[in-house]
């Protein structure tokens, strides 16, 4: 034993929705005692750091119901069942921003909130945009913007950019600019 | 109307656990139709980018039940009810790593997963560690490590570092090193 691993002894489904699949599990801790674990199973998601021909970063402005606030984020979305993240990234980029791209590369994958969810975010970068066609989900309303790196950095300060993947994207662009 | 905002017309509590407080709400969309929204209300969390006297980054290695995996993360934890994040950051740093610090500054706050949760992560930086005393929660098992920035970057590549706040922390340290 590694002294860290927990072993599932019971798993109870609490709710199965469009995004959230919640389980309440019972585990055996490394010291032999038991504890409960709440787990939100999530299909995973993709996000795209997209730089246009002027080097501006594409952002979508949308209302986020959980915090009842309009924020700016990089284009992103959930994976469809069994969807390849590489495919999903191109799909979401076009659906949300109306851009396709020639080339796209994966730059990171990270768990959004490992304490209670298995949501894995796949992050891509592209700077070879070509015109496509925006087509949003029927319950999705958003606006597309392109901002300079300086504007994006200010939006992080102002908290208009306020989510993990987009703060990550701004850092990524800053590192890229410094390393050029 | 801004053409983006959704209005709550119904809210139903589904589950209230130790971390996850789940609601299934009904909203009116900007175009007047209705939709459901799943929301995990979360108390918020703190994370600490802590550099020791050699400039090494403190990491904690722990089993994360949702992905059934041992990963390395920066020290972090949930806010207690009504707790000031500045206090929580010092508390979690000491509880998890056994270090206090002279000075600490907030470097970012971001939503971990704005599509379904209001979890807000407050991120701090300190490079003035002083000895304290580790005291973990009773269902918490973890090991503390200090790694160079080069090692940390390799661990991101290897996916031993695989969560949003820690990937953010490594980029923060890289930007800090380049801007010195």
Image: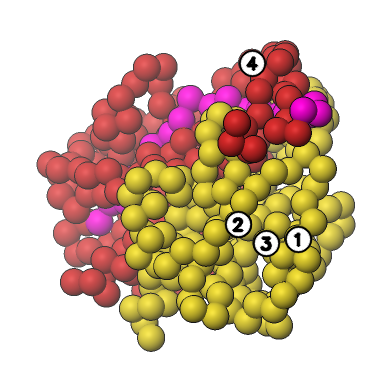
Chain colours: A yellow, B red
Distance CA(mark 2)–CA(mark 3): 6 Å
Q: Do the numbered discs 1 and 2 sit on residues whose CB atoms are within 8 Å?
A: yes
Read off the residue under disc 1: A134
Q: Residue at 69% of width from left, 43% of height from top?
A: A141
Find the magenta span and give its range: B32-51
Dot 2 and dot 3 residues touching (CB under 8 Å): yes
The answer to the question of whether label 4 and label 3 lie on touching residues, with beta carbons closer than 8 A, is no
Q: Secondary structure at mark 2?
A: strand
Tell me the CA gap for discs 3 and 1.
Answer: 6 Å
Q: What residue is drawn where x is 81% and y is 36%?
A: A18
| Secondary structure predominantly adopted by residues drawn in magenta | strand
Secondary element under disc 3, as helix, strand or loop, is: helix
Q: CA distance from mark 1 to mark 2?
A: 10 Å
Give me the disc on residue A80: none
**Residue B161 point in image, percent of width and height:** 50, 59
Give the residue drawn at x 15%, y 49%: B128
Give the labeled residue for mark 2.
Answer: A144
**Marked residue nearer the N-terminal end (3 or 1):** 3
- Circles 3, 1 touching at the beta carbon (< 8 Å): yes
Q: Which mark is residue A97?
A: 3
Q: Chain of mark 3?
A: A
Name the residue beneath numbered marker 4: B16
| In front of the other: B157 or B21 | B21
């Amino acid at each position: 034993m590694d002294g860290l691993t927990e072993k599932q002894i019971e798993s109870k489904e609490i709710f199965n929705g469009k995004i959230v699949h919640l389980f309440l599990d019972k585990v055996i801790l490394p010291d032999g005692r038991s504890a409960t674990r709440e787990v939100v199973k999530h299909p995973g998601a993709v996000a795209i750091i997209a730089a246009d021909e002027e080097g501006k970063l594409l952002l979508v402005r949308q209302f986020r119901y959980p915090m009842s606030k309009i924020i700016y984020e990089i284009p992103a979305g959930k994976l469809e069942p069994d969807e390849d993240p590489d495919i999903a990234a191109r799909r979401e980029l076009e659906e949300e921003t109306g851009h396709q791209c020639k080339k796209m590369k994966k730059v990171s994958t990270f768990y959004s909130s490992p304490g209670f969810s298995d949501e894995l975010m796949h992050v891509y970068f592209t700077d070879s945009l070509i015109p496509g066609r925006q087509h949003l989900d029927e319950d999705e309303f958003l606006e597309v913007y392109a901002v300079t790196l300086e504007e994006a950095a200010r939006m992080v300060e102002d908290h208009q950019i306020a989510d993990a993947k987009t703060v990550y994207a701004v850092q990524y662009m800053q590192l890229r600019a410094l390393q050029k």
